[in-house]
Image (spheres, rainbow, N blue to C red):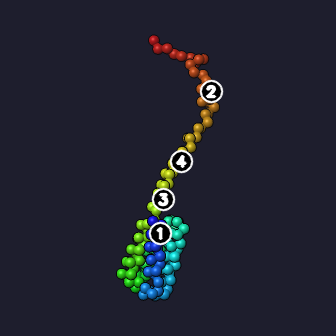
Amino acid sequence: MRRLVLSAAVVLLAGCGSDAGLPAETAEALQATVATVVTAVNAGDDDAARTGLTRLREDVAAATRLDRLSDDRGGELLALADEVEAGLSPPAPVEPEPAASPAASPPAPVEPESDDEQKDRGKGDKGEDREEDD
């Protein structure tokens, strides 16, 4: 499978040559991007290959918009890029960031008791006069 992907990438590189009717500057830029993809595929670095293919698609779109690349030729290059990407291993799933837990609110401050409250706290019913209802 890796050999098939590499072959498709090499065909893609050849398709970006100046003999393909592209202006030299455009051909060189596309070739440099495709060379990065070929190197990544050859090294087994599928993430880098995907990044290079994304860049290639952007470059092809820009060259087509600027009439430096025909729509037909751009479509062929994009189809080859899709073929290369289809042969790569699936990207690793992105783990969602854990939701930030709300910060625990600090406990409410305890107000110190006044002197009168401190005195009354220990008395209870003892020692106080109690009136009884008849």
Asked if residue 21 shows in the view, the reply is: yes
Disc 2 is placed on an element classified as helix
Q: Amino acid at mark 2?
A: Lys
The x, y position of residue 120, in whole percent, is: 60, 26
- Which residue bears the numbered disc 4? 103
Residue drawn at x 49%, y 51% is: 99
**Earlier sequence position, callout 2 versus callout 4:** 4
Q: CA distance from mark 4 to mark 1?
A: 53 Å
Of the image marks 3 and 4, the number of the one nearer the N terminus: 3
Residue 71, x across and y down, in percent:
36, 81
Q: Amino acid at mark 3?
A: Ala
Check whether the beta carbons of the residues at disc 3 and disc 1 lie within 8 A of each other.
no
Q: Is residue 26 visible?
A: no
Image location (x, y in percent) of residue 91:
46, 61
Nearer the observer: mark 3 or 1; the answer is 1
Q: Nearer the viewer, residue 111 or 48?
A: 48
Q: Position of residue 87 (x, y in %)?
A: 43, 66
Mark 2 or mark 4, whichever is nearer to me: 4
Q: Which residue is mark 1?
A: 3
| N-terminal label among 2 and 1 | 1
Query: What residue did someone put label 3 on?
Result: 92
Callout 1: SS: helix
Q: Earlier in the sequence, mark 4 or mark 1?
A: 1
Q: Place residue 82 in its image quadrant.
A: bottom left
Residue 80, picture quadrant:
bottom left
Residue lying at the far top in this picture: please name it: 134
Q: Residues within 10 Å of mark 3 (few under 14, many from 20)?
A: few
Q: Which quadrant of the rendered structure holds the N terminus?
A: bottom left
Alpha-carbon span between mark 2 and mark 4: 38 Å
